Image (cartoon, grey):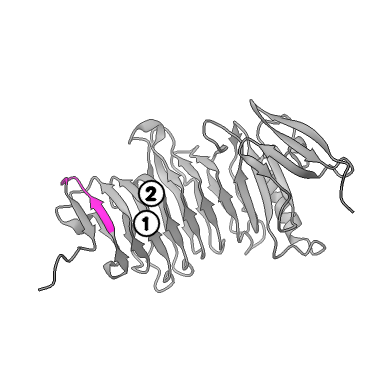
Amino acid sequence: MPVTNIRSRWNKSGFEGSLDFYRPDTGTSVLTITEGGVITPNPSGAQDYFVDGNVSTTGDGLSWGTAFKTLAEAITASNTSIALSDNRWWARRNRIFVCGDDLAEDLTILPEKTDIIGVGSDIFPFPRITGNHTIAATRPTAGKGNGARFINMGFIDADGTADVFAVPASCHGLSFIGCHFIPKTGGSAGKALEITDCAHVRIIDCVFDVGVGSMTNIFAVAISIEGDAAIHDTRIIGNEITATAGIVVAESGASAMGSLIKDNVIRAVAVAIADASDDFQVVNNRWMTDIDTGTSTAGYDFNLQLAAGNIQMGVTGLCDTIPFTKIAEG
């Protein structure tokens, strides 16, 4: 039977807000209109949660009107619901929608099979979380944390020495899509992303920024893929990176075959791309480095047999094509 008794409410968040149409009998949102677009019910049939860092008191997280105050609360609730045997949601995905002007927390667990989606506006058209997130190996149950995707989220380094994200083994399917990483003013000695022995990772269309426009405010390493057991099927595509070192991949034996570094624009002080595994395909990247590339190989380290269409600019003022381009036969 169709639902006809629908009410509306205005959910205020700072200077922004959203118009929520909901069922009065259950409080469940039917349709929410935000500055970033329309939010419809979860298409997989699992649960949606809402986080608003501007609320004075936390709620149950089931609507904007009763939003959680922190992302950590939403992650805990999501991990509980996705695992309930009564729900049988093991092949579904929860969603966590996040807004707020002042989110500050250090995450220690990832949500299982859940999308974390930034909505609304801060200075940017997404929320930013200030903190450093060291994900526990137990998270909270050993082996859990698969399939977490961060979409349109900002992350600010609060510490200046620790990594923004340090992710342990077996958080497979971890994705950062359209996210923004901002170093601490004065520089970040750590890494924006350190991901160890996680397969099927996606880092796509992200920005690893320069703090307040100064090269003294950059990450030591933007993306570090570590471990030697399971880093296969990694995709690092379409990112804008400014850092001392851009993309670093550890020696991995033969566990990284099928992985791809593609279409990234990198401004590096040191080596832009260093793949010690020699397993990644490195295609159509563009980078600038402060290294003297009179010897062109000084600016990169990867398997040329798996590379095509890259361009390097060093302090010599001359571009190198990587691999070198053959002009003519004979």
Q: In the rendered structure, which amino acid carries the disc numbered 2? A: Val
Residue occupying image coordinates x 76% and y 41%: 63
Question: Residue shown at 39%/72% (left/top)?
Answer: 253
Observer-nearest of 180 and 25: 25
Instruction: Inspect the image, locate mark 1, and give the three-letter code of the amino acid beneath it.
Output: Val
Instruction: Based on the picture, tell me whether residue 33 belongs to the magenta stretch.
Output: no
Locate residue 205 relative to residue 49 in the image: left or right. Answer: left
Along the line of sight, the residue nearer the viewer: 151 or 249: 151
Could you say whether the residue bearing mark 1 is in a helix, strand or loop? strand
Label 1: few (<14), some (14–19) or many (≥20) C-alpha neighbours in 10 Å: many
Quarter the C terminus occupies: bottom left
Q: Identify the residue at the far left of this view.
A: 330
Residue 300 at x, y percent in the picture: 27, 57
Q: Residue tagged by mark 2?
A: 221
Give the image location of residue 69, x and y in percent.
Answer: 69, 37
Instruction: Kindly identify which numbered label has been placed on residue 248.
Output: 1
Q: Position of residue 234 (x, y in %)?
A: 46, 63
Q: Which contiguous range is marked in magenta?
A: 310-317
Dot 2: what SS? strand
Badge 2 vs badge 1, beta-carbon distance below 8 Å? yes
Residue 95 in sight: yes
Label 2, label 1: how many angstroms apart (C-alpha)? 8 Å
Which residue lies most toward the top here? 15
> Looking at the rendering, which quadrant does residue 304 occupy?
bottom left
Q: Residue at x 71, y 47 (%)?
A: 40
